[in-house]
Amino acid sequence: MKSIWIVDDDQSIRFVLEAVELVRRAVDESRREAVAEEGADETPEILGQAPAMQDVFRAIGRLSQSHVTVMITGESGSGKELVARALHKHSPRAAGPFVAINTAAIPKDLLESELFGHERGAFTGAQAMRRGRFEQAEGGTLFLDEIGDMPFDLQTRLLRVLSDGQFYRVGGHQPLRSQVRVIAATHQNLEERVRQGAFREDLFHRLNVIRLRLPPLRERREDVPTLARYFLQRSARDLGVEAKRLSEAAMQAFSSFDFPGNVRQLENMCHWLTVMAPAQVVEVKDLPPEMATVPTAVSASAQAQSAAPTMIDGATGWADGAAGASQAPPPEAAPAWLLGLEADARARLDAGGAQVWDTLTRQFEGQLIRTALELTRGRRIEAAQKLGIGRNTITRKIQDLGLED
């Protein structure tokens, strides 16, 4: 049953507007608290025994008590957001919200509104005033991921905020002050972006007050065994099953593998093993298809050697298999997943199966989309960008393949 309010005088109109404003403030505040609580719950400790990570820990300890702007550099998947969360968690702003935004994942036309908010009627579809990430992070920390991909015209607005602490909502005329610590991150070479004219030099120097380099996993191989155990245990806990464990040969293969996706790829592999490995003890033959790129000589030696386990408790790290690269398999060698597809297709075709093309195509597309959605935590637009398809295409595929749940 709908309620209809009839307002016929100025006093009543003011009353309704004040009531609406109170509700809006309450909703904004609840969202802000939710962001802070979520950030606190999801913040894991970053631990590691590798010397490269010890340097990072010392830097975090020194920077946590400062309000200075920090630039975190490192390869994709190496854990830059975890470092940003650690800086916030151990800082005087820890009681405030931690708000993260990936500037590369949001369309250019929407990014300005996401950062600074907008007033009602500022553009088509702006039916209500909306607070941006700077306002949501008030009193806390704003993490700007992939800052190197920020559109050039927005870089000017960001520089203004960093310089004098003031900004305007889109369509607004009232300046707002920002009490936010900014931590930026990028996997790109910003100096090169500046030389190319794609990044403002003055903004670069404003952000690059303190630079913290996060090492890729290939520079901290000794942490790979512990990270693998950690992710296997966490994945098993999330799925409510018994944790798998890697055999000595499988662990050696993991430590020898070149992880181009760094910690994120290691975590995904451990999740894959939790679901797909046939036994509790994972052998070399059970490893994910990507492991087919491990040099055969290394894999053979892995079956005869044991990997000394290291213990860390963190959720960041990665291994790179540069060792033995000279003995890599020939380029024409097919990856394991393609051989598996060939075997499956051959069996179906020999058995006279119906609609083999449609069946395998649906499985292939479904797995690609599920993996991309898992990596982006269900964000369809970002998943579509990673897959190189349009947002309408991924929406249609999700519906056609029955992936809504």
Image: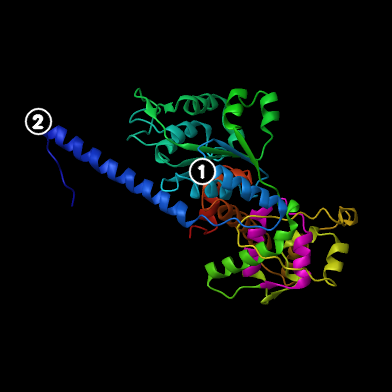
| Residue pictured at 38% horizontal, 31% vertical | 118
Q: Which mark is first along the chain, 2 or 1? A: 2
Element under label 2? loop
Is 250 one of the magenta-colored residues? yes
Give the amino acid type for the residue marked by disc 2 in the picture.
Asp
Disc 1: which residue: 65
Residue 312 place in picture, x, y as percent: 64, 62
Residue 9: which disc? Answer: 2
Look at the magenta stretch and give its main secondary structure: helix
Q: Is residue 261 visible?
A: no
Q: CA distance from mark 1 to mark 2?
A: 54 Å
Left/right placement of residue 343 relative to residue 126 reads right
Q: Give the image quarter of residue 311.
A: bottom right
Residue 168 higher or lower than 346, as above or below: above
Element under label 1? loop
| Residue pictured at 66% horizontal, 23% vertical | 197
| Residue pictured at 38% horizontal, 37% vertical | 131
Span shown in magenta? 245-274
Is 152 one of the magenta-colored residues? no
Give the amino acid type for the residue marked by disc 1 in the picture.
Gln
